[in-house]
Amino acid sequence: MVIYYDYDMLDVFLTDTRQPQLSVDFKCAPGELLALVGPSGAGKSTVLRCIAGLHAASHGVIRSNHKDWFNSSNNVSLTPQQRRVGFVFQNYALFPHLTVAENIQLASPDKTDVMMADTLLSKVRLHGLGQRYPHQLSGGQQQRVALARALARSPEVLLLDEPFSAVDKVTRRKLYLELNSLRRELDMPIILVTHDLDEAAMLADTMVVIHHGHTLQQGTPDQILHQPNTANIAKLVDVRNLFQGNITHEDPVYRLQWHHFSLEIDQDNVARNKHNLDKQTVSWTISPTKVLLHQRLRPSRGEQENPIQCTIVEILTLRGITTVLMKVQDCDDLIIQMDLSEHVAIRNALVTGDTITVSLLASAIHLICN
Amino acid sequence: MMDWQALAISLKLAIFTCLTLLPIGLLIAYLLARSQFVGRGLCEALITLPLVLPPTVLGYFLLVSMDQNSVLGSSFVLLTGHNLAFSFVGLWLASLIYSLPFAVQPMLRSLEQIAPELREMAWCSGLSKWKTFLKIELPLAWPGIITAMVLTFSHTLGEFGVVLMIGGNIAGETRTLSIAIYDSVLAFEHEQAQMMSLTLLAIALVTITVVYTFNRRHGHLLRL
């Protein structure tokens, strides 16, 4: 049986001026799934290897369950064997000469507990496959074995390094659902490394953006994807509506001057950044899901808020979500993206070349200090 | 007429060489595969040298190093009262040198082929480095180890030039099957030479077939 412990916060603070450079600072609570996101080569996997004890940063602290796993000031650096981590590698790293059950038993603290492998295999829906060898399993099954093996050690921290990258898209969706359901039973900090923002947004409670070994922002998926702290983060997380404007002050109200539009903005948002924003050029974003279409047949609330006339240049539909690319009238080089349910696009008979009006809701406009 | 004594000497030499080179070769291969150090290239070159050096050249240097006036030769005389050159022990030491690349290279290649993630995964699973070697690396490197032993065995069995230089042709001591074949040919005893040659051919064919079959069956284990 898996033994569950009272877990505490995983605290990671690392700096390294050598290659690969690191400047990383984040915390992960028990039961929380934290996704480290960033482009390939950003240093995500290096951070995971540092936590596991497979790579040592020159300075920093890694603390789990009130215990220092790594502390450069005290010269503490526990070996991977001394840190109780469950690690799922990108290619799963299953021992090819051992059966599935032997793979799991090898990682178990009690090597004689034959029931544990069965229990864990049932947990990952692979009951009865214990006597197979890894090469006799599909990619999805291998990933589940790797997860079961990672849990066999009753880990204090579960580390998942791009665990979905080696399977096809259909299997990946199934595995997302399974991990999501499994993680409700897990009460240790879980760190997921991925370069897939959708994957991170779907599974994670918290996202940490990492680039060139530096953590840039930590927050909920909604904060990271819709309220990035800097224009650089906005680009890294592929914010689709990223523009520049100027803050104008018409006492007591602040507005956003964007080309020839004077947009209403959330005054609370301004108040938080007042000293930064006053008369400044700022970057700003609006989530494509929060661009409001003025329906032709049924006007709705919010239509008075920042109305903009646009011409549709492209319509793309994927899995029930329609993305509409629109040129802002009188500003042909400005393209706004809007996401709608497919049925809304059909009901409004949107076609390329149509002129439509959308509202940029003040509460959805996120200002980024330059 | 088959020279059974020569066959026995050949088999004894091959078995002794295999058993000695198993731990030595594995240790050298492991150090080369897992550590980075200055002079690694020179080390690999020295180990591979017997492959490319003419056997007579290698035999000459070995003979000189086993001479009574050399450190090795004089120490051996001091310890045993016998000459190292033209003795079975001398032949055995020479075999270790000329068969070293046949033992080290396959083991090194198979250890290098093991994905580093497997060792790291073993450590993260709580296995010490020694247990990781025993439970993960050794079983996965097994095809390479078998190949190394079979190649060492068959190469030692068939070596001629170095054996002639170091061992001479002392019946019951250093006269191996390949030397016996050479003698038979010189004495125009073609029937005897043919029988002994066919014996060596059969042994070589069987051993190489074993290696290929084994590696084909177990080669997939090394790939992730």
Image (spheres, rainbow, N blue to C red):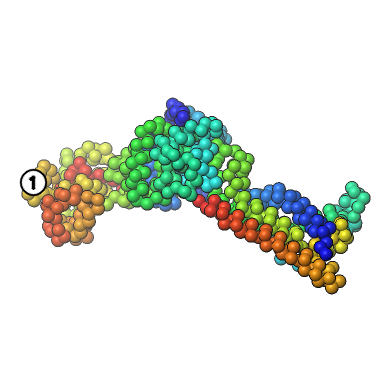
| Side (left or right) of A28 relative to B110 | left
Front residue (pair B119, A263) = B119
Residue drawn at x 22%, y 47% is A289
Q: How far across and how far down the image is residue A126, in percent?
A: 42, 40
| Side (left or right) of B199 relative to B143 | right
Front residue (pair A29, A102) = A102
Residue B66's place in the image compared with A38, above or below, is: below
Residue drawn at x 42%, y 49% is A138
Q: Secondary structure at mark 1?
A: loop
- Residue A345 visible, this orientation: yes
Q: Chain of mark 1?
A: A
Q: Give the residue type at disc 1.
A: Pro
Q: How far across and how far down the image is residue A211, in percent?
A: 41, 48
- Residue A158 visible, this orientation: no
Front residue (pair A335, A254) = A335
Instruction: Report the residue marked by disc 1.
Output: A299
Q: Residue furthest bottom?
A: B188
| Side (left or right) of B100 relative to A46 | right
| Side (left or right) of B35 relative to A338 | right
Q: Residue furthest top?
A: A6
Query: Mark 1 Cα within 10 Å, few/some/many (few <14, many 20+)?
Result: few
Residue A94's place in the image compared with B151, above or below, is: above
Q: Quadrant of residue B174?
A: bottom right
